[in-house]
Image (spheres, rainbow, N blue to C red):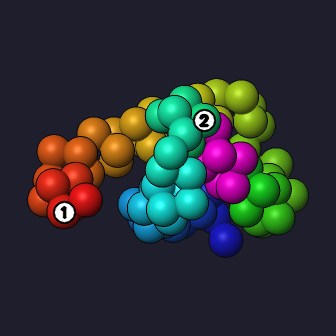
Amino acid sequence: MDFLATLLQTIAFVPALVHGIEGLFGHRSGTEKKEAALSFLNTALSMSNAVTTRQIVDQGKFKDGMGKVIDGVVECLNASIWAKAK
């Protein structure tokens, strides 16, 4: 699988991941929840073809970028009816 497809699949998975992390760790801080989401993504990506074929050459930058995606998804969800339904 090429890198772009892997990246898009990962980004598409983030809203469901954020929702699940919120359900599991709702009582924890935002930083702890973000770290849990990043840890889960890192574990999933470590098994993916993108890492094994070295298409992700700087995992630190990739993790930072995914952290920004997670922050964006959380901001969008918090601005939506999703946050009001709690």
**Identity, as a three-letter code, of the amino acid under mark 2:** Glu
Closer to the N terminus: mark 1 or mark 2? 2
Q: Which mark is residue 59?
A: none
Label 2: how many Cα within 10 Å (few below 14, some 14–19, many 20+):
some
Q: Three-letter amino acid code at disc 1?
A: Ala
User: Nearest the camera: 59 or 35?
Assistant: 35
Residue 77 in percent (x, y) is at: 26, 51
**Element on which disc 2 rests:** helix
At numbered mark 1, what does the secondary structure look like: helix, strand or loop? Answer: loop
Task: Tell whether position 27 is magenta.
Answer: no
| Magenta region, residue range | 35-41
Q: Residue at x 66, y 54 (%)?
A: 41
In this rendering, the answer to whether 54 lies above or below 19 is above
Residue named by callout 1: 85
Q: Main secondary structure of the magenta part?
A: helix
The residue that mark 2 highlights is: 32
